[in-house]
Image (tube, grey):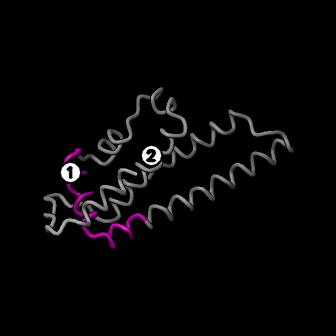
Amino acid sequence: MSLIVCVLFLSSCKDEIERPEKLFSKEQMVDMIYDLTILEAIKNNNPSFLEDKNIDPYTYIYVKYDIDSLEFVQNNKYYASDVKEYGKIYEKVLSRIEQNKSEVDTLLKKESKKSALQPISRDSILNIKKKVLKKLDGE
């Protein structure tokens, strides 16, 4: 929600946003926002999961992409200043999330077939979460 307010605020400003010294490509922004979205969803759905592993979503992004918080904020602000382009970035993020959701649904169906109408165990769900996190680290 706060991201939406930020985007609306930035789009209402008439001042030209300066191009960051280290400008990330749109694909890099898609990757970072995708990773953040997944991590924030995990954090909101199961807060102890990331806490137990001592993972902060933003710190994770900074380390994974070898950037600092200022670079991320400047790039996010720059791309958010063009609402149409920022919308395209988020469309790609949502598309990737939908694709991964489909993959997870397929894994869940396979697991439920294996258990022959038995409810999916907590261990099976944790294994699927681990596969998703591995995929997140691999991208």
What residue is drawn where x is 31% and y is 69%? 83
Looking at this view, is 64 or 26 the one in front?
A: 26
Within the image, what quadrant is residue 14 found in? bottom left
Amino acid carrying mark 2 in the image: Asp
What residue is drawn where x is 40% and y is 33%? 55
x then y, percent, for residue 28 = 33, 59
How far apart are the alpha carbons under marks 2 and 1?
A: 21 Å
Q: Of discs 2 and 1, which sits in the foreground?
A: 1
What residue is drawn where x is 56% and y is 61%? 98
Looking at this view, is 31 or 87 the one in front?
A: 87
- Secondary structure of the residue carrying numbered label 2: helix
What is the magenta segment's predominant secondary structure?
Answer: helix
x then y, percent, for residue 116 = 86, 44
x then y, percent, for residue 133 = 51, 43
Between discs 2 and 1, the one toward the N terminus: 1
Mark number displayed over residue 71? 1
Magenta range: 68-90
Question: Would you name the residue on which mark 2 appears?
Answer: 137
Looking at this view, is 42 or 17 the one in front?
A: 17
Mark 2 packing: few (<14 Cα in 10 Å), some, or many (20+)? few
Mark 1 packing: few (<14 Cα in 10 Å), some, or many (20+)? some
x then y, percent, for residue 73 = 23, 51
Amino acid carrying mark 1 in the image: Glu
